[in-house]
Amino acid sequence: MIAELARVVTSDGLRLDGSLERPLGPVQPPLNADAVLCLHGTGGNFYSSALFDEVARWFTGLGLAVLRVNTRGRDLVWPGVRGKQRRLEGAAFETVDECRHDVAAWVGWLAERGFSRIAVVGHSLGAIKAVYSLAHETTPAVHCVAAISPPRLSHGHFKQSVRGAEFIRDYEAAQDLVSAGRPEELMRVSFPLPYLVSAAGFLDKYGPQERYNILKHVDRVRCPLLFTFGSVELEQVPFQRLPEDLSGLGLANAKVAVVAGADHFYTGVLDQLASRLETWLSE
């Protein structure tokens, strides 16, 4: 694999890095894309995902360029500079709404290089960012979106789940820290996923406004959509009933697929995931 390092500066002044893998030949018909933009999940980055390793290998072999990128939510914490102001970035401190700047910058980078039929493929939180960004800002160069295992970021769903007491405990602790003027203080939480997050970041993602509940945004995405889930992960609270609820919206431009035997990272069945993506891009 030969990759070209890529770099953008977002509209709010943040520098992000990525890598472009060139296609191994011409686009294989009838694929309806010429490039794939890969968005990592919580705390990920452009170079460490085994899932996107397989996606990149598969699609460059079919004649598509693959751009794997960082968003501002890369890794847990990293020292960023917006304009001339230094601040802590990363999964612990991100405001998910700002992903719009990241996605727009990377789509623009590809468009400037002549790619006009971009498939945005996001995994986990990256899948939510793909849907959320394109629900708020239509980009002609984006031809379609594949959301791989987006969790349901729903305050109400979490509160009523079997782990509701655990969720409310952490939510109230985050509220107390913000009220005490300590929004950037880190909390160790175990649900809906185990990681360190700032109090303000926890409230942003999981507050009662449900800003990032994909069920509230998917109908505003105008291009074709594919949602995939693993049958194993559907037993977990953040994914329960999501395929049914998405299908129940009755959207003509959206399809939902469940990969048998797959966990959240499609361990052991990445070839099946890639095959599903290829079939969808051919339709």
Image (cartoon, rainbow, N blue to C red):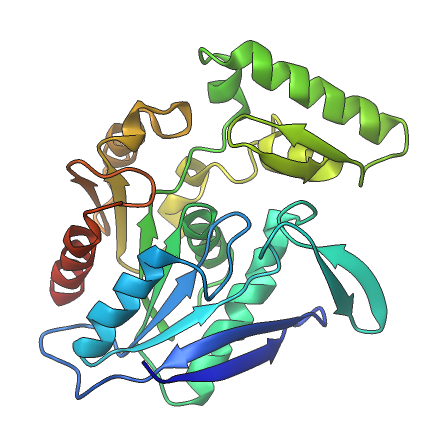
Could you tell me residue 267's position as x and y percent? 26, 45
Could you tell me residue 150's position as x and y percent? 39, 42
Left or right, 76 with respect to 20, comes to right
**Quadrant of residue 251 in the image?**
top left
Residue under the image location 36 percent in, 30 percent down = 239
Above or below — where is 43 with respect to 155? below
Above or below — where is 7 with respect to 90? below
Could you tell me residue 178's position as x and y percent? 82, 31
Left or right, 136 with respect to 52, comes to right
- Find the residue positioned furthest to the right: 181
Residue under the image location 17 percent in, 82 percent down = 27
Left or right, 135 with respect to 272, comes to right
User: Exactly how many numbered labels are in the figure?
Assistant: 0
From the viewer's side, name the closer residue of 53 and 40. Answer: 53
Residue 222 in sight here: no
Residue under the image location 18 percent in, 64 percent down = 281
From the viewer's side, name the closer residue of 233 and 119. Answer: 233
**Quadrant of residue 250 in the image?**
top left
Could you tell me residue 191's position as x and y percent? 54, 25
Q: Quadrant of the N terminus?
A: bottom left
Q: In which quarter of the image is the C terminus?
A: bottom left
Residue under the image location 31 percent in, 32 percent down = 233
Above or below — where is 118 with respect to 230? below
Left or right, 72 with respect to 180, comes to left
From the viewer's side, name the closer residue of 215 and 13. Answer: 13
Residue 56 in sight here: yes
From the viewer's side, name the closer residue of 165 and 142. Answer: 165
